[in-house]
Structures are given as C-alpha cells and as structure tokens.
Image: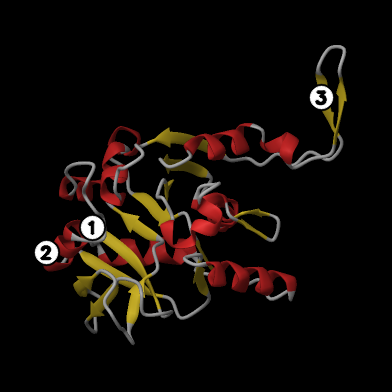
Amino acid sequence: MKVIILSGGFGTRISEYTSIIPKPMIRIGGKPIIEHIMEIYSKYGHTDFYLALGYKSEIIKEYFYNYEILNSDFKISLNDKVITPYNSTKKDWNINLINTGINTMTGGRLKRLRNYIKDETFLLTYGDAVSDVDINEVIKFHKKHGKMITVTGVRPPARFGELTINEENEVLEFKEKPSATQGWINGGFFVIEPEFLNYLDKDTCILEKEPLENAAKANELVAFLHDGFWHCIDTKRDKDNLEEIIKSDRKRW
C-alpha cells in the first residue's frame, strides 16, 4: 500500500526548531523523525512513500536527494567529482516528494494527492509521531470491519482529537482537540479507502474537522485501539522526552 505522510505544516508550537527546519526534519537520535516514521512502515513491508510537502519543502527534498552522502562516510575525487561511499546506507524505499502548497491544510494536502492515490486503499499518518503499533494488524482490522476509514486510537495527553467509540469499535463522534480528555485520541496511522477523498474539497479543508466528523456520522470510521507506545513531537519537551528514551535504550518503535 502507498504510505502518505503529511509533512507540510508550520509546526508553530515548536518554533525553536521550525523557524529553521520543517517539523518532520527535527532530529531524534541523530536522524529526522520522518525517517523514524518511515522505518516503522518499512518494518511491516510498506516502502512506497508519498510525502505531502509544504513549509520549507526544499529541506526535506535535499535531505532525501542527498541521503546516501549525508548518511555515509565517503571519498571524493575533486578532479572528476567521483564519490565513493565507504559504508553505504541505501534503503529499498520509493520516496515521492510532492509539494502540496505552503498554506494548504491537512485535508487539502490529501486532496492534492488524489492523482497519486487513484483507486487504491492507502495508509496515512502525520510527520511528527512514532509508535510501536503493528501496521499490518491495523490493515487486517480495517479489512475485517469494512469501513471507509480506520484510525489508530491511543491514550496520551489531552490536546489531541478525542474519539467516542462504541463496543464494536465504531467511532460515534470525532472531536478535534477538546480542552480535556481521559479517553482515546487520534494517534494517526490511518488506513483509508479512496472514496474518502470525496469528503475533501479545497486547500482550506482540515482533515480532522468536517471530513472525519462527517465520516463518523456516516458510520464509516472505526478505531484500532492501541494501548502500546505512542509519542509525538508537539513541543520541545516532547522532543527532549524522545531523545531521553533513545539515550536510555528504551526505544520501542
């Protein structure tokens, strides 16, 4: 399946870093968090990536264009510019870097990828969160329930979209960023049928508002509940927490 990663936001809540680089390029354990996310999908055999770019897109493009050089020791002949890597770090990934606009919102970015998605079921996540969720189990769950969208529900802090779920794991209500929550929240790691693209309209469309709210009202949104590890980078404190997890050899994703 194609893996779409929303990678174009301004990341204003962590402007200590995003004034210089886009949020997905914030480094954790020496490499950008977006690469950590891609490794999660790659672990389960999903390596066809579509990065929906916007803010400072050139930095993400340059990183992957120069990936082998940036992640290897190498010898360069200044005479003929021949470069010989000593320890190649090539990965069998296909990475499609698509500029979806500077001011485009999350739903608009996804809408702009319609021609790449075509009529295929696809995977979608954000460019700022890691988890030990089993991607293939989420896909299996999605196929079993036959809904248009599966969202991974997780249980961290109160500042994310809250899910109201019935006994069949059907999402009855989707509320984006309530003031407080003690239940399940939107952790990303979606599986989506292409028909959902019809719920999106223009660049200002916010995925987490009317599109997902309306899908829930239509009984087409179901939650895969993940009680394991999930952590996003929303603030400097979040970034420091992830760094500490890696330094203390407690990485779980």
Q: Between 19 and 218, which is closer to the camera in this rendering?
A: 19
Residue linked to disc 2: 218
Q: Please identify the quadrant where the C terminus is shown.
A: bottom right
Q: Secondary structure at mark 3?
A: strand
Residue bearing mark 3: 83
Q: Nearer the viewer, mark 3 or mark 2?
A: 3
Please name the residue shown 47% across and 54% down the image.
Answer: 127
Does 62 sit left or right of 81 as displayed? left
Q: Quadrant of residue 174?
A: bottom left
Of the two numbered discs 2 and 1 on the same chain, state the one appearing first in sequence: 1
Give the amino acid type for the residue marked by disc 2 in the picture: Ala
Q: Is residue 217 above or below residue 24?
A: below
Label 2, label 1: how far apart the Cα atoms are? 10 Å
Q: Residue at x 31, y 63 (%)?
A: 150
In this figure, which residue is indicated by the disc labeled 1? Answer: 148
Lower sequence index among marks 1 and 3: 3
CB-based contact (under 8 Å), mark 2 and mark 1: yes
> Horizontally, is 88 left or right of 220 in the view?
right
Q: Look at label 3 and name its amino acid.
A: Ile
- Residue 201 percent location from the top left of the image: 16, 43
The residue nearer to you, when weighing 229 against 60, is 60
- Residue at the extreme bottom of the image, as rendered: 182
> From mark 1 to mark 3, how far is it between C-alphas?
48 Å
What residue is rendered at 66% in x and 74% in y?
245
